[in-house]
Image (tube, rainbow, N blue to C red):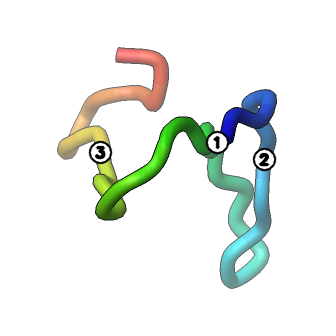
Amino acid sequence: MSTAPAFVRIGGVPHHVVVEGTGPVCVLSAGLGMAWYD
């Protein structure tokens, strides 16, 4: 399964998401002072 990158709103805040492959969920999040594209 593969989908294009997208933005979803959680609590009114847009979050960039990508869904690929199968298996357990893995969430990667930028730390303090970093941007999502880092």
Cα gap from disc 3 to disc 1, whole angstroms:
11 Å
Q: Residue at x 28, y 39 (%)?
A: 30
**Residue closer to the observer: 21 or 33:** 21
Q: What amino acid type should be assigned to the residue bearing mark 1?
A: His
Could you tell me residue 13's position as x and y percent? 70, 65
Going by the image, does 31 lie left or right of 24? left
Above or below — where is 27 with respect to 16? Answer: below
Total marks in image: 3
**Residue closer to the observer: 16 or 5:** 5
Dot 1 lies on which element? Answer: strand
Above or below — where is 28 with respect to 13? Answer: above
Mark closest to the chain's N terminus, 2 or 3: 2
**Residue closer to the observer: 37 or 6:** 6
Q: Which mark is residue 16?
A: 1
Dot 3 lies on which element? Answer: loop
- Quadrant that contains the N terminus: top right
Mark closest to the chain's N terminus, 1 or 2: 2
Q: Quadrant of residue 6?
A: top right
Q: Quadrant of residue 24?
A: bottom left
Q: Which mark is residue 7?
A: 2
Q: Tell me the residue that label 3 is attached to.
A: 28
Going by the image, does 12 lie left or right of 22? right
